Image: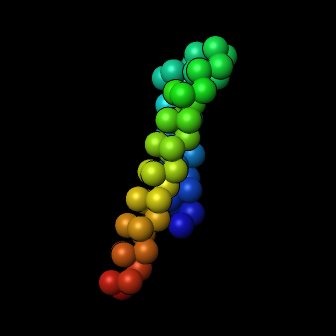
Amino acid sequence: MRTALAFGAMFTATQAAAHPGLHVHGDSGSSLGLVAGALAVVALAGVLAWARGARA
């Protein structure tokens, strides 16, 4: 799970760096999309980590 959280944080930081104007201009739609995307990545990574652990 720590790996999933770390990956999600890295993804979010990467997206924020790639799109620095999202929060500055108050583009709430894009910001919400960014958050939703980050949560989806964390959830997917968590499921993959759980599946890997279940097989072991």
The reply to whether residue 14 is in sight is no
Q: Position of residue 24 (x, y in %)?
A: 66, 16
Q: Position of residue 35 (x, y in %)?
A: 55, 40
Question: Above or below — where is 14 with respect to 51?
Answer: above
Q: Which one is in front, 24 or 26?
A: 26
Question: Above or below — where is 43 with respect to 24?
Answer: below
Residue found at x 56% / y 56%: 5
In the rendered image, the residue lying farthest to the left is 55
Question: Above or below — where is 45 with respect to 15?
Answer: below
Residue found at x 48% / y 23%: 18
In the rendered image, the residue lying farthest to the front is 29
The reply to whether residue 9 is in sight is yes
Q: Position of residue 21 (x, y in %)?
A: 58, 16
Exactly how many numbered labels are in the figure?
0
Residue found at x 57% / y 46%: 9
Which quadrant of the view contains residue 55?
Answer: bottom left
Question: Above or below — where is 38 with respect to 21?
Answer: below
Q: How is the image coloured?
A: rainbow
Residue found at x 44% / y 51%: 41
Which quadrant would the C terminus be assigned to in this image? bottom left
Q: Position of residue 13 (x, y in %)?
A: 56, 35
